[in-house]
Amino acid sequence: MEKQLVVETKLEDVNTISQKLTVTVPPQHIKQSAKKALNELKKDAKVPGFRKGKVPDDMIKQRMGDAYTEEIVRQVVRDSYPEAIKLSNAHPISDPRIETETAEVDESKPYIYTAVFEIYPKVEPKDYTGMKLEKEKVKVSKEEVENELKALQQQMTQLEPAPDATIGKGILARVDFKGTADGKSFEGSEAKDFIVDLEAKNLLPEFEKQIQGMKQDEERSIEFSYPEDYFNKEIAGKSGTYEVKCKELRRKVVPELNDDFAKDLGPFKTMDDVKKAINDRIAWFKEGQQRQMMHRQVMEHFSKEQPIDVPDVMVSSELGSMLEEFSKQLESQGKTLKDIGLDPSTFVREHMEEAKLRVRGYIIANAIAQKEKIKVTDDELDQRIKGIAQQTGEQEAKVRKHFTDNNMLGGLKSQMLIEKTRDYVVDKAKVKEGSAKKAAPAKKEKKEKKPAAKKKAK
């Protein structure tokens, strides 16, 4: 076993989030590192007349020059830095920035270098009990309950063959189509087994109008003009021509909202039971939203009242997580950053302050958890994994294996600790409950209507 290096260290605070470690390496260990560096260089050295790995040491040193010296320095740091960290009892959270007083290496003298790295800041949390928070009074309207019922009704709707029907209200059609714009095909201009539901209103009105009344196995040619403001600028304002074939028709069999329907949904006897369950679920969801809003207020309070410095490495990590989450949201919509005209560097610039705010909130929350001895139990972790399994529809064992195999259990537990600590602060806060604020009317976005989204019939 290779002996540990004997090094002299001196640890100093640079500021609240970084330290400087001065390391002195004895001559005998510099010789060892220099030999390692030379052997590494010899492995890949190519000199005419010599086999690979057989180039003489003096020739390597002469040919490599400054590169040889730089490799020795790198090797000295690689060999000594881990032990120096251990001896100094330092706890870096970032890679070190190595600084040397001289680039020259004298194997007969000690070599001195400094390593500057970031550390997790020490924080004494203050004013985290009795803070003033606001929340909206949770109310569930009849309309919200009715909308949920309608959604359930749609989910329970059955389809039965209707070969004698025609495309229209209450009928689903499976069609093939092939089209052009000004005589040229384009992306999305052709589809097979496309599902047409006129009640969904997801196609161009002119397209829907001209396929109404089609019978099963009927083929029809239709023509229309794409709107000037069509979302696809490539074909906006052009003449569209389509060949459409109706392959199958099915009729929607919509169940009535009665007690029999309630019994089909689960452990319910009447529709009133279902409505109460829906009301409770919506109320629970809204309460969760209000809880999240108060968590946000807590984080903003921390950032404002205790504006501590935050390590760059933690901010960079948070920005990476934010970018990954945003990219996944776009992916679920079939889009990418490029599609919306956003590049990663712009995202980072625009979200830098938000990332700092979040990291500051994490650090202070962790300090509160430590002070108040708040912990996440194994049982609580198990319950969270069960919840994730239920949400994703995966088996609990598979979810646990995913977190374990990817070393994510620690991260999940840390996230839960932050949430539990914020709940603690919220429970200790003075909460003012008020009426829901009316949001300003949002600008209506133009829907992307296209007769080319591919959807297979079931």
Image (tube, rainbow, N blue to C red):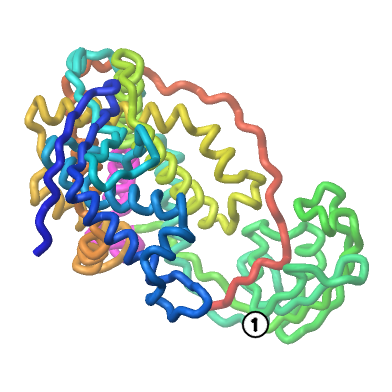
List x then y, in percent, for residue 287: 30, 34
- Amino acid type assigned to the residue bearing label 1 in the image: Glu
* Residue depicted at x 27% and y 13%: 132
Which of the 4 image quarters holds residue 377? Answer: top left
* Residue depicted at x 56% and y 55%: 333
- The residue nearer to you, when weighing 243 against 57, is 57
List x then y, in percent, for residue 120: 24, 32
- The residue nearer to you, when weighing 386 against 65, is 65
Q: How many marks?
A: 1
Magenta segment: 259-285
Say whether residue 180 is magenta: no
List x then y, in percent, for residue 147: 46, 47
Q: Is residue 45 above or below residue 220?
A: above
Describe residue 305's horizontal placement relative to residue 127 as left or right: right
- For label 1, count other residues whose C-alpha is less than 10 Å away and answer few (under 14), some (14-19) or many (20+): many
Which of the 4 image quarters holds residue 162? Answer: bottom right
Describe residue 60's horizontal placement relative to residue 339 as left or right: left
* Residue depicted at x 42% and y 52%: 149
Say whether residue 268 is magenta: yes
From the image, tell me which residue sits under label 1: 248
Q: The residue tagged with tag 1: helix, strand or loop?
A: strand
Describe residue 178's horizontal placement relative to residue 260 as left or right: right
Residue 426 appears in the rendering: no
